[in-house]
Image (spheres, rainbow, N blue to C red):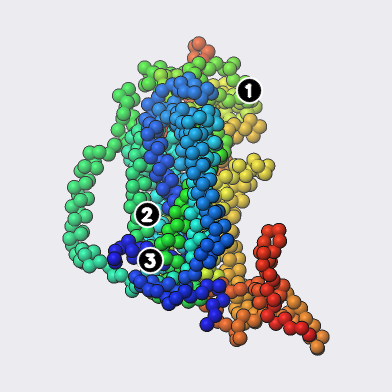
Amino acid sequence: MATPTGFEEVGTPSRQDGVEIVRYQPRFQPGSRSERRARRIVRSLFGVSGAAAAGSVVAYLTVPSESATPVLGAAVALTLGTFGVALISWSKLLLPLELAVEQRRAAPTKPPGLRRLTRRPLLTGGLALGVVSLGIPFAARLLRNPHTPTDDRVPLSPSEYTGWHPALNDNQPIRLVREDGRPIRPADVSVGGMVTAFPGIPGGASNRYADSPTMLIRLRPEEAARLRENLYELNRDSMAGDFVAYSKICTHVGCPASLYEQQTNRLLCPCHQSQFLVTDNARPVFGPATRSLAMLPIAVDGDGYFVATSDFKVPVGPSYWER
Amino acid sequence: MMTPLRTLRDKVFPDHWSFLLGEIALWSFVVLLVTGAFLTFFFDPSMEQMTYQGSYTPLRGVEMSRAYASVLDISFEVRGGLLIRQMHHWAALLFIASIALHLLRVFFTGAFRAPRRFNWIVGVALFWLALLQGYTGYMKLDDALSGTGLRVAHALMLSIPVIGSWLASNVFGGEFPGTVIIGRLYLLHLVVPLAMLGLIAAHLFLALRQRPAQWTGPGRTRRNLVGQRYFPRHALRQGGFFLLVSAVIAAMGGLFQINPVWLYGPYQSAVVGAASQPAWYLLFLEGSLRLFPAWEIRFAGYTIPPYFWAGVVFPGLLVMLMLGLPLLDARLRRDRGVHHLLQRPRDVPVRTGLGAAVVAFLLVLTLAGVSDVLASTFQLSVDAVTWAGRVGLVIAPPVVYWLTHRIALGLQQHDRQVLANGVETGIIVRRPDGGYQEIHQPLGPAALDYRGTPVPKKLNRLGPPGPALRGFFTPIEQPAAPPDHRPR
């Protein structure tokens, strides 16, 4: 029977290890021109790869560090790539065409040892129970209770206070400061402007008090009036003149909700696009957030700087089970 | 000389481009191990604060953690460090992308069916571990972007009912961000690859023992395997392919910038940039966080926040669905057989349609994960884009299911038409009675049955107009004479 694929049987089909080689055909007459050409291609690819490898070493030693990354990357890529192409062309150009057929063996059954083990549910169940009951006391010793106070100055669990808690400052109100520690005066903020404020305590701007960053906003007078009308009972006396301070930590999943759109009076969280209305207690008006941003009660102290009269009155940031 | 090695040497491997996807994953994992080993020499997982004094001027004098500073050192001081770091990152992206495509290939061709059900589960575990590994990889650099990502992870842990605050507090060693999380992420990033190595070994061992499934075709049955022996051809190609994958990763690492953390600055809880997004492979979770409505359940002083459903339950369900797929498929199709022949997606229209619907769902979520970028690029309102995502999430999957199902049925029908009538030639003749008719080139002496094999749809060299002649400037072969060419 003629084979339409261009393969031809060479000798009789050979068979070993359950594999039958149906067709096996050299691509060339030995020593023919096309064979020499194919060999030349593969050989020169190996040659290029070798040269590129040498080039990579030279590049590693000599190229100045500003341009080392692209030069080294290109040289290594050339080395590996030409070597890979050489191997593939070897198989495609030089190796004989072949078609082999392997007979599948019947599906292996489950090893008997495993079956014997799973047939004893009492044994495995008892083992599991033992491990678990031994583990519980160990785990209980290791686990940290999130509701125990960690700072001896504040008798609260760490999730219940922020860096604005007066106990962190000998029960004195804490100043609102910039990132570099400079306190903020009302005149520092232009009308319709926003400043990110941190608690004026040691390390107040650091990640140690990651829940404390606060947005100090100076509203236009008519908008401040509207906010004063809308204030929640909880937030009474929290504003200082036309100034209001909201927690910067989004009540969705805790990103800094820091984009303040002056015209619409909205705060936008750039992570998940929750939007909060500044003139209404920073109530969420769009997006996945469910709670208002906490308002920090502020006042101006005797030296004319902003202070927080107390900590936030509700937990800041994301909701959780026992909130 | 009947050694295991010789049996391996003579094993037959079928050949198809789609079988290479898993191989790309394997080789990028090897690159990840090598480049990762290099990086462990220089990365310092400490969150202790220090002042940067290295050679990158814009950050000199800035307070940052040792972890972030050591990443800057890898990028700017270590010779070849940036190349290796970028190769590591690109290899990770390639790894995850190729695993995802490999999973889709296995799904749409039915290669997950018995007896390969357990190996599918191993593959799914590897996929999710790869996502976790990618996440811990770029989280532990402690730059502004990674800190924001950690904050989200912290909130997702907190959101779990009853145990949330215990879990978050124990993982982070206290309040967010604490001082231990980078070290723990780093430990996880070193341990997970060991688990993956074991799973990959199991995956390959099972695949080798069960022998690969093959496409249907002439001479191929469920009892045999038609292809080429492992040695020398398959081995040579595999080696070449490994080097090619490494070369592509090296070229990308050298030429294309990825994750330039020095531009983001160290993590500060008050700082975030616009367009803060996770890596593309986690965008579907970001999208689900963005699209899920603000539905919070509050009762008796307890709260279940909305992102619990979007960020914990949803991926959990996805994992369950993927793990349970082989059993679900066997149950729904009442299929108890053992399969060694792959299915063409068109031949299982319902499964193909459902798979496409799930992919559409994930794609809508992925697009929603970049909703702010879409809004600013196309000058749209963020609210409108969010709503489009919410509506799209409901509408896209059924529409895609219906379309895919129709297309699959149409392709099936066309295959059968060609087998019955022959290949369309595009030649229209006028019949003696005045009507017009297209000439078909028959495929055989009689109508053929469909056997799950690709059907020729184009004229071959037996018919007009003949194939293009080989040769670049001049033909290097003679045109074949049409078989029915007879002088009139």
Chain letter for mark 2, please. B
Chain letter for mark 1, please. A
Residue identified by numbered label 2: B200
Q: Nearer the viewer, residue B446 or A14?
A: A14
Instruction: Tell me the SS state at disc 1.
Output: loop
Instruction: Tell me the SS state at disc 2.
Output: helix
> Do the residues marked 1 and 2 share a common chain?
no
Q: Is residue A86 above or below residue A98?
A: above
Position of the N terminus of chain B, as image quadrant, is bottom left
Residue identified by numbered label 1: A191
Q: Position of residue A262 (x, y in %)?
A: 63, 30
Q: Nearer the viewer, residue B211 or A310?
A: B211
Residue that extends furthest to the top in the rendered view of this protein: A303
Q: Residue at x 53, y 45 (%)?
A: A48
**Residue B453 appears in the picture as rendered:** yes
Mark nearer the viewer, 2 or 3 = 3
Whole-angstrom CA distance, mark 3 to mark 1, is 81 Å
- Mark 1: give few (<14), some (14-19) or many (20+) Cα within 10 Å: some
Mark 3 and mark 2 in contact (Cβ < 8 Å)? no
- Mark 2: give few (<14), some (14-19) or many (20+) Cα within 10 Å: some
Q: Position of residue B276 (x, y in %)?
A: 54, 38
Whole-angstrom CA distance, mark 1 to mark 2, is 61 Å
Mark nearer the viewer, 3 or 1 = 3
- Residue B10, picture quadrant: bottom left
Q: Residue at x 50, y 27 (%)?
A: A214
Residue identified by numbered label 3: B10
Residue type for callout 1? Val
Whole-angstrom CA distance, mark 2 to mark 3, is 22 Å
Residue type for callout 2? Ile
* Lower position in the chain sequence, tag 2 or tag 3: 3
Residue type for callout 3? Asp
Q: Nearer the viewer, residue A39 or A274?
A: A39
